[in-house]
Image: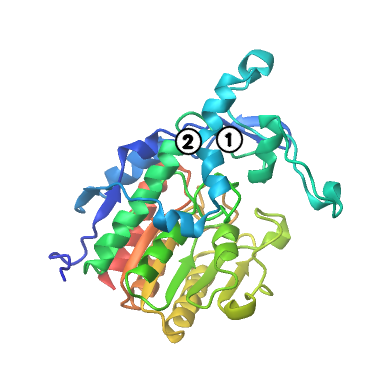
Amino acid sequence: MTTSSTPGRVPVVWSPDTRLHEPRHEIWVGAATPAVEVPARVDAILAALEGHPRHEATRHDDAVLSAVHDEGLLDFLATAAEAWAAGPYAELVGQDRVVPYFFPTPAMTQGMTPTPAVALHAQTGRWCYDTMTLVGPGTWPAARSAIDVALSAADLVAAGERTAYALCRPPGHHATRAGYGGSCYLNNAAVAAEALRRSGHERVAVVDVDAHHGNGTQAIFWDRADVLYGSVHVDPGAGWFPHLFGHATETGTGEGAGTTRNLPLPEGTRDARWVEAVGELADWAGSAGCSALVVSLGVDAAADDPESPLLVTADGYRGAGRALGALGLPAVLVQEGGYHLPSLGGLVAAYVEGHATS
């Protein structure tokens, strides 16, 4: 077993292919708005973590990915952009990104067995649950590379590193087993947790500090006892994404009863209460017998972030890092949200510093 030789220096795993995803815009309440999950996020974070050792991700097979995600979703994401480009959409409506307009919800199917849609623009709504998360020619290569980043970081931890940071882009915590949305396509944190389980850890905790609840990660581990999911986030009951999930009453089911914990916070929550909530989740994970940790490190709870209703500062993220780092568990830090480019890298660096030096 090997460990990092220099205290406070955390291996940074990344891939240049994560820059390939270019959403260009989102469709929000029917209007095209500029995308905020942009390739420049990668370089902003790399620049801020320059003092840490850097590792380029290695290619992994699909074994862990397929254990987390439905094969139908993987096949769709791998082929959708090429199929869309071969269709009439760019010429007819000027849309060169895959975007759904039709969602076969229970309100339509009413218990009937639907015949699968033929048109690609109708098929898309089977897998995508919002109109914000567009697929372009670089989306699958970037998302699949982000999975390799997460798995490579998990490999480092399995080999003896106390902590490894996975610079995943696009983010992943809104991706469910068979669906994508919320700017997320594949669930990097869930894949990292599954990889740690397979490396010998009987129980893994995923703690999510993104501003928004990670409904996808919660869904994937909802009925499992071997992976805990805890999240601190803005209250979805106040109208925030993902709207339907992230409430304190959601605690898991079956073998997973009690393995989900949500701490929704009101708009305008600042450092003190936010860090306190992260500490509550750290104590919860520590008392549950977990031997490894995945941190869904979204930094969009920061005051300057365009997606944030919270007012967390760099000191807050440093404090969160100390709280979770103090558990002393082998940890994979997986990048999630964070969209204010001038402050993004510094916020990530503050968390990593706190985690590594606690």
From this view, report whether residue 225 is shown above or below residue 118: below
Q: Secondary structure at mark 1?
A: loop
Q: Check the picture and name the quadrant holding the C terminus.
A: bottom left
* Label drawn at residue 30: none
Rendered residue at 73%/33% (across/down): 30
Does 225 sit left or right of 15 as displayed? right
Q: Is residue 46 left or right of residue 171?
A: left
Camera sees residue 298: no
Instruction: Give the residue at mark 1.
Output: 134
Q: Residue at x 33, y 68 (%)?
A: 331
Q: Type of residue at label 2?
A: Thr
User: Residue, x 28% and y 61% (percent of image)?
Assistant: 155
Query: In the depicted view, which residue is nearer to us: 95 or 306?
Result: 95
Q: Circles 1 and 2: CB distance less than 8 Å?
A: yes
Whether 5 is drawn above or below 102: the answer is below
Residue 165 lies, in percent from the top left, at 32, 57
Image-based side of 116 in relation to 331, left or right: right
Q: Determine the CA span between mark 1 and mark 2.
A: 9 Å
Q: Position of residue 6 (x, y in %)?
A: 14, 64
Q: Disc 2 marks which residue?
A: 139
Residue 245, compared with residue 39, is above or below; it is: below
At which x and y percent is residue 78?
49, 37
What amino acid is at disc 1? Leu
Which sits in the foreground, 28 or 122?
122
Q: Quadrant of the N terminus?
A: bottom left
Q: Quadrant of residue 152?
A: bottom left
Q: How far across and how far down the image is residue 206, in percent?
A: 46, 68
Q: Earlier in the sequence, mark 1 or mark 2?
A: 1
Residue at horizontal 56%, vertical 46%? 73
* Quarter assignment of residue 262: bottom right
Q: Helix, strand, or loop for circle 2?
A: helix
